[in-house]
């Protein structure tokens, strides 16, 4: 029986999507998230979120944000569940940045991010002289764990998750299934056995993993 390692603890419904296929599943959190104690503005015009962790960090802060811009379907859902008005959405940071430079070139933005945020989005906005303030609302730390076994597929949801897994485990013949291009770029430092989900959601990563394994098993 083929086996899958998830570098993130799944919800019950997500877990069932895997187990209903008959494949084995092992789960752990490859990264730890902690929210930072930082003074936050009560109102901003334009807020940028590229992860669900940033949304969770400001969830109970009662910040009024006139317009929201985000990366990822689940990030968008989390923001809309909090009542925020999502003006622009993209599947990765660079695509969001490109939309912003075209549609909101004169606007001022606040980027709610973590300590390991990627450079692509801020660099693109600064290149186009767009005013950007960054607020670090959470920190990511690696939960490095060594596995005394192999897997047929490993589901990865962030560059930090990739780094954490390979921090204690050597590449084998497994396929690394990534949530997006940025995570895939990180995985390419360790292996060329990579697949990328069709959309930036956990469910899409699961679907892609099952599809990859069904071709072999």
Image: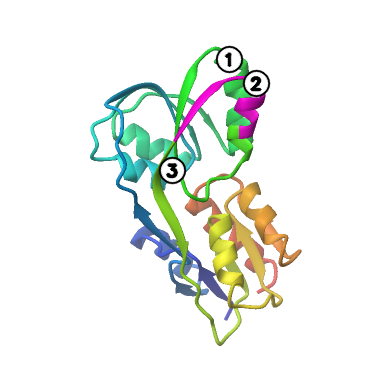
How many marks are shown on the rendered structure?
3
Specify the segment rendered in magenta.
123-134
Q: Secondary structure at mark 2?
A: loop
Residue furthest out toward the top: 106
**Crowding at mark 3 (Cα within 10 Å: few <14, some 14-19, many 20+):** some
Residue furthest out toward the bottom: 148
Decide which of tag 2 and tag 1 comes sooner along the chain: 1
Residue 57 drawn above or below residue 160 = above
Horizontal arrangement in the rendering, residue 106 relative to residue 212 (left or right)? left
Q: Say which residue label 2 marks.
A: 128
Q: Residue 48 at x, y = what percent?
A: 46, 31
The colour scheme used to paint the residues is rainbow
Q: Is residue 14 magenta?
A: no
Decide which of tag 3 and tag 2 comes sooner along the chain: 3
Q: Say which residue label 3 marks.
A: 74
Q: Say which residue label 1 marks.
A: 105
């Amino acid at each position: 029986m083929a086996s899958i390692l998830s570098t993130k603890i799944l919800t019950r419904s997500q877990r069932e999507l895997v187990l209903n296929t008959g494949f084995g599943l092992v789960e752990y959190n490859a990264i730890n998230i902690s929210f930072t104690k930082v003074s936050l503005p009560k109102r901003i015009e334009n807020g940028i979120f590229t992860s669900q962790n940033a949304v969770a960090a400001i969830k109970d802060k009662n910040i009024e944000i006139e317009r929201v811009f985000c990366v990822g379907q689940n990030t968008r859902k989390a923001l809309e569940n909090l009542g925020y008005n999502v003006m622009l959405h993209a599947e990765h940071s660079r695509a969001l940045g490109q939309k912003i430079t075209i549609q909101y070139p004169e606007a001022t933005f606040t980027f709610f991010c973590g300590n390991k945020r990627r450079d692509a989005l801020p660099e693109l906005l600064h290149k186009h002289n767009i005013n950007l303030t960054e607020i670090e609302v959470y920190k990511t730390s690696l939960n490095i764990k060594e596995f005394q076994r192999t897997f047929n597929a490993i589901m990865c949801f962030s560059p930090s998750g990739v780094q954490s897994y390979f921090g204690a485990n050597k590449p084998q013949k497994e396929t690394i299934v990534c949530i997006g291009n940025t995570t895939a770029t990180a995985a390419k430092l360790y292996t060329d056995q990579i697949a990328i989900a069709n959309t930036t959601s956990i469910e899409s990563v699961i679907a892609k993993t099952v599809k990859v394994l069904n071709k072999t098993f």
